Image: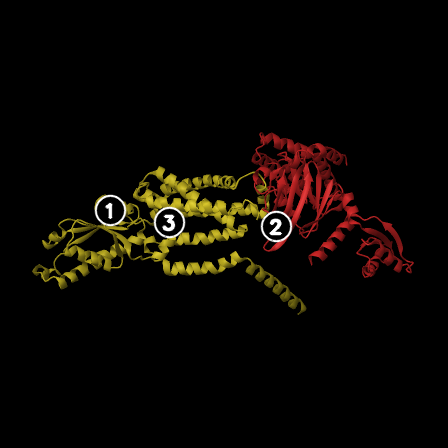
Amino acid sequence: MRGAAGSLRRMGAMMRKEFIQLLRDRVSFAAMVSIPLLQLILFGYAINTTPRHLPTAVLAYEQSALTRAILAAIENTQYFAITHHPLNEAEAEHLLRSGQVLFVVEIPAGFERAVRRGESPALLVSADATDPVASTSALAALGRLVETSVRRERFNLDDAPEGSGLEAAPPPFEFRTHPRYNPAAVTQLNIVPGLLGTILTMTMLIFTALSVTREVERGTMETLLAMPIRPVEIMVGKIAPYVMVGALQAAMILGAAVVLFQVPVVGNLVLLIVLTGLFILTNLAIGYTFSTLAQNQLQAVQMTFMYFLPNILLSGFMFPFAGMPTWAQWIAEALPLTHYLRVVRGILLKGATSADLAQSILGLSVIMIVAMVIAVTRFRQTLD
Amino acid sequence: MSARAEGEQAEVPLAAEGDNNYAIDVQGLSKSFGGHRVVHDLSMRVRRGQIYGFLGPNGSGKTTTIRMLCGLLTPDEGQGTCLGMDILTEGRRIRRHVGYMTQRFSLYADLSVRENLEFVARIYGVPDAATAAEEAIASLGLKGRERQLAGSLSGGWKQRLALGACILPRPQLLLLDEPTAGVDPKARREFWAQIHDLAAEGVTVLVSTHYMDEAERCHEIAYIAYGELLAQGSVEQVVADSALHMWRVTGPDPAALARELMAVPGFELVAPFGTSVHVGGRDREALERAIDGLSGRDDLVWRADSPSLEDVFIDLINRSKDKVR
């Protein structure tokens, strides 16, 4: 009996100590509270695997009551949101390649007349099928919903005599869908290039996030600061080796993507290499910033994890970017992975050029510069 | 002592050059952390080529002062020069010529002895880092261990390596923060021999310590407690300045005796020392009256004694505590 009571008391003492330490370690505590909250919010509100209101461009060579009715019907499906009205094919192509729209609906000239003549003309819908999840259900809805709603509308609005026989007749027009870049809807083609971004994010962040905190924790930082070396010199010296590690990783993943998963390299490989370098630097700068914020290595790892979570969920790696609500998209725009995914998928699958990717390149550069400025100013030259 | 004599002879010609006479010359340094005052209005001067002992209890502000001297901390108030350079504005230039050995071993545990030394040599821009490291290994007596990881060295060897790394770039000023803590007596003795050699070559050494015997190896000492400099000068000077009168009293039960004597007015300092008790105070008459009052006790043997450095410091602490509270 005494033995049991003693054991309980010792365990009680241990628990008490553990709770005190837990409450004192603020970052761990914050992680415990914020990670479930973050997941709840992101999975509950931001993520949508049957995304709606996908950005769509309309290349209209004809404006008529019928085309307006069709476009209204397309939007009424809730799957499409007409956001752009390009003037020519090149512009439409750029919108698609840069990822600004997922669909381009092309209305040919003389469309309405062809319908009236019963020629059953085609509306061409080009879809960015790099992410099959995003495009498949929308395309499926197109055929069904649009057709029926157009029929109904024409019945109601139009008492044209030729309309009386429509139900039995062949459809007045058809949608010719053209899933581009990944016509077979192979998931790997979307995921594997994305992996390049996520793997680089994870490893680059962890390495650099630990690098400064390790020196602080081991006491070597004090000696380092007492030496005639500048903070920028320390930062460059610490980051440079990891640029090489990142390059090696990128080469490995890219090689595997092409050899094992048959990912095509449609675009310019040199452009991809340059932008991958930019992405690696951005991540290293962010990791370095964490490194100057964290008090010990555990905190650095926790910070990295808390940062990694929204990256995975919001960047468009796992779930379609276009399907997220606006607030989530805004958050995602601040994450380098979001921009890099557009770059890597754009170049590998769509053959995007630097002009197509200008926005993503700008986004990455801005994030990198901001992170570097924070890192250098946060890095304390003294122990104050 | 010979090094000290040389230093004093050199004082006259160097004095003409003004600040250059002092390796460290700071006035009114203050530093607070989170409202807690760690160093208060500290002024000190250390002549070039001197070994300057920096003494004080734990948490008295020694490390903070040393960090301010080498630019690792910015003083809240105060000014001064280190090697003739402004500590507030010329931090980086100062660092080039200062070797700072931290309290905790802070070389890279996962680098070998040689790699650590080469790293230091390269950071300081020593022309031939490999040769410099090689020479340092030889002079440290670390030959045969140069490939060993620094983290796997024993305490004494770590300290030796840390000092070796400090002096490798040939600094003019060494700041050593409790370099001999946890080091065995033999290694300590060798360490001090090396410090004296360096001083003889003209290097100024500021060394903080808890050990009184080490204080007596310094040319000059400063005593700091509660962030304030309480005494400064040569050991003899500090002892003389204390104006303490000490007695050694031997009796049957020193611990009980010490407790008893503490209650007697006139004894400002009471400390049991082995089989005897050290008592003393600054007021000679009061002290003698108190001893006379105990003349009835024939089991006690009184003997006049000279104050030790430790007595002086305990007295200083007691008095500064009274002042602070």
| Residue at image mark 3 | A338
Q: Position of residue B313 (x, y in %)?
A: 75, 50
Q: Which corner quadrant holds the N terminus of chain A?
A: bottom right
Q: Earlier in the sequence, mark 1 or mark 3?
A: 1
Q: Which mark is residue B31?
A: 2
How would you rate the neighbour count of disc 3 (Cα within 10 Å): few for under 14, some for 14-19, many for 20 or more? Answer: many
Q: Residue furthest bottom?
A: A1
**Secondary element at image label 3:** helix
Q: Amino acid at mark 2?
A: Lys
Q: Which mark is residue A159?
A: none
Q: Which mark is residue A92?
A: 1
How would you rate the neighbour count of disc 1 (Cα within 10 Å): few for under 14, some for 14-19, many for 20 or more? Answer: many
Colour in which the image shows chain A: yellow
Q: Are marks 3 and 2 on the same chain?
A: no
Q: Are marks 1 and 3 on the same chain?
A: yes
Q: CA distance from mark 1 to mark 2?
A: 65 Å
Circles 1 and 2: CB atoms closer than 8 Å: no
Q: CA distance from mark 3 to mark 2?
A: 46 Å
Q: Amino acid at mark 3?
A: Thr
Left or right of B241? Residue A150 is left
Left or right of A333? Residue A183 is left
The answer to whether residue A295 of the structure is visible from this angle is yes
The red chain is B
* Chain at tag 1: A
Q: Amino acid at mark 1?
A: Ala
Q: Nearer the viewer, residue A237 or A306?
A: A237
